[in-house]
Image (cartoon, helix red, strand yellow):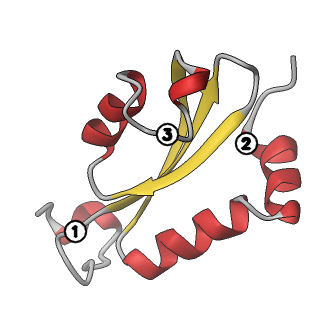
Amino acid sequence: MQDPASFGGYDPPSNQTWFVYLLNCADGTYYVGCTSNLNERLNRHTKGWVSATKGRIPVELTLYICFFERHHAFSFEKYLKSGSGRAFTKRHLVRSP
């Protein structure tokens, strides 16, 4: 676990880190997911082992956000998958072509 000082004095409640991530898929769409092991999950996506993205590879990691509490990560993922969350993503998280 990292030194709490590296978190601005905040001592995270657990040593588990959760990630909400955004993938840019080959078909021009985005995929939003949540995991506690980002490297392993990206590996699964790139090998075509995730049904939601296997027809859209290659995928590229566009963004990830760290959370120290699981429910915050899953709540944010759920929001990004909603209509207003998709609009927020397009406006603030991804570049327009």
Q: Circle 3: is it few (<14), some (14-19), or many (20+) Cα within 10 Å?
A: few
Marks 1/3 in contact by CB < 8 Å: the verdict is no
The residue positioned 73% from the left and 42% from the top of the image is 93
What kind of residue is marked 3? Ser
Marks 2/3 in contact by CB < 8 Å: the verdict is no
Q: Is residue 26 left or right of residue 58?
A: right
Marks 2/1 in contact by CB < 8 Å: the verdict is no
Q: Is residue 34 above or below residue 13?
A: above
Q: CA distance from mark 1 to mark 3?
A: 26 Å
Q: Nearer the viewer, residue 84 or 15?
A: 84
The residue positioned 81% from the left and 53% from the top of the image is 86
Q: CA distance from mark 2 to mark 1?
A: 25 Å
Q: CA distance from mark 2 to mark 3?
A: 24 Å
Quadrant, the C terminus: top right
The residue positioned 35% from the left and 68% from the top of the image is 8
- The image position of residue 79, as x and y in percent, is 71, 68
- The image position of residue 53, as x and y in percent, is 55, 33
What kind of residue is marked 1? Gln
Q: Which residue is mark 1?
A: 16
Which quadrant would residue 6 be assigned to in this image?
bottom left
Q: Of callouts 1 and 3, which one flags the residue occurring earlier in the amino acid sequence?
A: 1
Q: Which residue is mark 3?
A: 51
Q: For the residue labelled by badge 3, is the local secondary structure a helix, a strand or a loop?
A: loop
- The image position of residue 10, as x and y in percent, is 32, 78
Q: For the residue labelled by badge 2, is the local secondary structure a helix, a strand or a loop?
A: helix
Q: Give the foreground label among 2 and 3.
A: 3
What kind of residue is marked 2? Leu
Q: Nearer the viewer, residue 24 or 55?
A: 55
Quadrant, the N terminus: bottom left
Q: Nearer the viewer, residue 54 or 37?
A: 54
Q: Of callouts 2 and 3, which one flags the residue occurring earlier in the amino acid sequence?
A: 3
Q: Which residue is mark 2?
A: 93
